[in-house]
Image: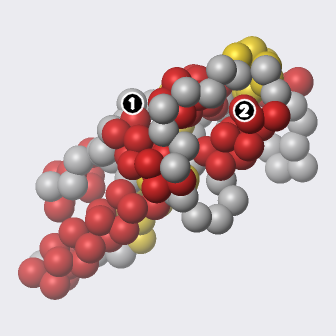
């Protein structure tokens, strides 16, 4: 089975949450892309989903295939940053910018939303609320307000 996911974050490694925390401590205002939408997904939630899939596949190998898994609700990078600052208590303000104002070597899709219906139907695995998962990650980092 293949599990496709998006916008992965955790207390470990380099990721958007840790970058925003660092920049939020250094700056009063940040510009963040607001026209790209996706589902932030905690690495721990991905691990739990994979364990659930593995159990389901042991019981019914015919369920093999490609599935999507992402946190809910879908959100822009700018709104994700705002929630990071809200939960961490950092006073940094977020100014929305278009993707064109933040060029990257690789083109980023405006729509990274994943339809996770098939995963929920096949394995009973629902999309987790990334805001609750963010709270756990911030606690692990010692960065919660």
Q: Disc 1 designates what residue?
A: 73
Up-down: is 138 above or below 99? Answer: below
Q: Disc 2 designates what residue?
A: 24
On the image, the x and y values in percent for residue 59 come to 9, 81
In front of the other: 73 or 113: 73
Residue 103, quarter of the rendered image? top right
Mark 1 secondary-structure assignment: loop
Mark 2 secondary-structure assignment: helix
Q: Is residue 5 left or right of residue 109?
A: left
Residue 58, quarter of the rendered image? bottom left
On the image, the x and y values in percent for residue 82 come to 58, 23
Question: Mark 2 to mark 1: distance in Å?
Answer: 23 Å
Q: Is residue 143 left or right of residue 93?
A: left
What residue do we see at 86% from left, 31% from top?
Answer: 102
What residue do we see at 49% from left, 46% from top?
Answer: 138
Q: Is residue 122 left or right of residue 36?
A: left
Q: Is residue 71 visible?
A: no
On the image, the x and y values in percent for residue 47 come to 36, 68
């Amino acid at each position: 089975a293949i599990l496709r996911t998006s916008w992965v974050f955790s207390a470990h490694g380099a990721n958007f949450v840790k970058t925003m925390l660092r920049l939020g401590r250094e700056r009063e205002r940040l510009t963040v892309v607001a026209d790209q939408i996706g589902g932030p997904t905690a690495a721990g939630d991905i691990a739990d989903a994979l364990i659930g899939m593995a159990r389901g596949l042991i019981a019914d190998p015919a369920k093999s295939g490609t599935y999507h898994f992402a946190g809910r609700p879908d959100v822009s990078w700018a709104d994700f940053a705002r929630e990071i600052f809200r939960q961490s208590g950092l006073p940094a303000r977020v100014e929305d910018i278009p993707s064109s104002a933040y060029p990257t070597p690789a083109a980023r899709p405006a729509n990274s939303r994943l339809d996770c219906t098939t995963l929920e139907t096949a394995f009973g695995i629902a999309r987790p609320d990334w805001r609750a998962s963010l709270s756990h990650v911030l606690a692990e980092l010692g960065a919660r307000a």
